[in-house]
Amino acid sequence: IRFSRLFSPQAAMTKLGQWLCGLALLGSAWAALALASPGLRLPAPLREALLPLPVYLLVAFGCYSLATVGYRLATFNDCEEAAAELQEHISAARADLSRRGLCF
């Protein structure tokens, strides 16, 4: 990859870059509110809900990840053609090794 291509205006942001930008934006907004100066008076219920917000978001992300992995695992397709082709390759390899004197 050339250096000029990395910083060109047409360069697409990767999914990791999108996640990191979103986390940086949320983290800075949370830090600005949670670590607010004394001049900014937040109501007590809002402040109590704001402080553990990163933990709540982490738990929500974990639940989302588990649900996504579970769904993808439940809807995983079997590849019948690939399995048959692999069995053919295995039987051909066994026949070749048997001709060469290897016993199974």
Image: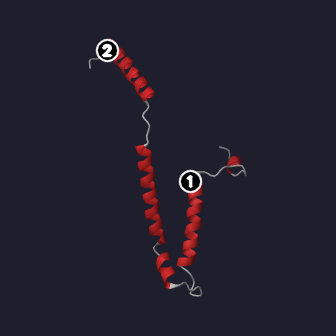
Quarter occupied by the C terminus? top left
**Residue at 29%, 17% in the rendered image:** 102
Task: Where is residue 64? Give x, y as percent.
Answer: 46, 57
Q: Is residue 36 above or below residue 96?
A: below
Circle 1 residue: 16
Give amino acid for label 1. Leu
Q: Is residue 98 above or below residue 67?
A: above
Relative side of 104 to 80, left or right: left
Q: Residue furthest left?
A: 104
25 and 97: which one is in front? 25
Task: Where is residue 14? Give x, y as percent.
Answer: 60, 51
9 and 58: which one is in front? 58
Examine the image and state in which quarter residue 62 appears: bottom left
**Residue at 47%, 76% in the rendered image:** 49
Give amino acid for label 2. Ser
Relative side of 18 to 83, left or right: right
Task: Where is residue 75? Give x, y as percent.
Answer: 43, 42
Quarter occupied by the N terminus? top right
**Residue at 48%, 71% in the rendered image:** 53
Circle 2 residue: 98
Q: Residue furthest right?
A: 9
**Residue at 45%, 51% in the rendered image:** 68
The alpha-carbon separation of the residues under discs 2 and 1 comes to: 49 Å
68 and 7: which one is in front? 68
Q: Name the front one of labels 2 and 1.
A: 1
